[in-house]
Amino acid sequence: MVLNYIWVAFFLVAFVIAALKLLFWGDYDVFPAMMDSTFASSKTAFEISLGLTGVLSLWMGIMKVGEKGGVINVLARLLSPVFTKLFPEIPKGHPVTGSIFMNIAANMLGLDNAATPLGLKAMEQMQELNTKKDTASNSMIMFLVLNTSGLTLIPVSIMVYRAQMGAAQPTDIFIPILLATFFSTLCGIIVTSLFQHINLINRTMLITLGGACAVVASVIWGFSQMDGETMNRVSTTAANILLMAIITGFIIAGVRKKVNVYDAFIEGAKEGFTTAVRIIPYLVAILVGIGVFRASGAMDMLIGSIRWCVEATGLNAQWVDAMPTALMKPLSGSGARGMMVDAMTTYGADSFVGRLSSVFQGSTDTTFYILAVYFGSVGVSKTRHAVSCGLIADLAGIIAAIAICYMFFG
């Protein structure tokens, strides 16, 4: 229901602003631009779904091999103490906990192509446990918030963009992104737990969160000892080695269990193709709404209003120029990426705005895109508190990014 209101608001606000621009400023290009955006966004949505078809088929095939080989069950048992606290609706030892772990691990390593199909697989398994098929369960919402908070250990793609834009030290945003995304994820877990009345003050969760903080600190220390070139090489190599190890490990586990791994892969791949086709309408809907909102000039007006409010209070408004990336990130990953590149082009890759835009890009994920794809893939239309929790986590990431960038680069 919340997504319905937001989608309608995109069109109504865009139409009103466009009408005012036509009547008072004689802007005859605004409505053609909006219509062009609807066609372009529809095409983009289809291309994204088409591009996902092969990746979904690959990873759902691999997941099926791992499931039949017993790997997913092993992961489920290992993670059961933690996941029974965060996902109390999921039965202890259920295979979905393994899928959730694999999705989170892929996100942390910046492996977006692997994370999406793994996440869709987890969502399908949770839907099997869901008693109200059109309504998001608590487990689905917690899982979605963990995805939208965008916990990333190795933001390889952002560092590559900074290198292409001529940054003297493309990796200088690595530690700020790591810190900002950690705060975003932590806030997301806490807020969702409050909504769902989950008690985090227990031995298991305190040890887990404390261990996570220790791991984050050790990663920060380890990479801080490397120069930029070494950091990029090590992070990229480690991510790809881990990815290939997962694929190979799943196949070996299947062979040990005397599973016909080829047939198992084909079975899972067929599910991936079906899922890719099923999400097309949901992607078209959300991307067209975002495209119209942008083409009407509503985003520019929003940024101008924020700048005026900040300057009226006498505060430093330097960070406002990077806000298009932050505001676009929950709506569209490619849109936010474009905003980030535009900020680095306009202000310089090594400027405060260029660096802050990069940290914004890496500190959270595309809330509405993930919501549309994950819930759409299983036919969930009532999202309950998913949007609220996801946006609160996004806000925490934005605030943390601004404070951290002033600390590092201000």
Image: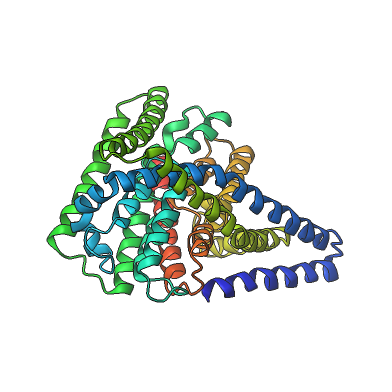
Viewer-proximal residue among 104 and 294:
104
Viewer-proximal residue among 138 and 181:
138
Q: Residue furthest left?
A: 203
Relative to residue 42, is residue 309 drawn left or right? Answer: left
Relative to residue 382, is residue 142 drawn left or right? Answer: left
Relative to residue 85, is residue 292 drawn left or right? Answer: right
Is residue 151 in view from this perspective? yes
Q: Name the residue located 38 percent from the left edge and 39 percent from the top edge.
A: 261
Q: Name the residue located 49 percent from the left edge and 58 percent from the top edge.
A: 370
Viewer-proximal residue among 360 and 264:
264
Relative to residue 130, is residue 82 drawn left or right? Answer: left
Q: Name the residue located 33 percent from the left edge and 73 percent from the top edge.
A: 195
Relative height, residue 182 to residue 242 (above, below):
below
Q: How many marks?
A: 0
- The way the protein has been coloured in the rendering is rainbow
Instruction: Residue 342: give x, y in percent of width and height.
Output: 63, 43
Instruction: Residue 333: give x, y in percent of width and height.
Output: 55, 50
Instruction: Residue 44: give x, y in percent of width and height.
Output: 67, 50
Q: Quadrant of the C terminus?
A: top left
Is residue 152 in view from this perspective? no
Instruction: Residue 230: give x, y in percent of width and height.
Output: 38, 23
Q: Name the residue located 45 percent from the left edge and 55 percent from the top edge.
A: 120
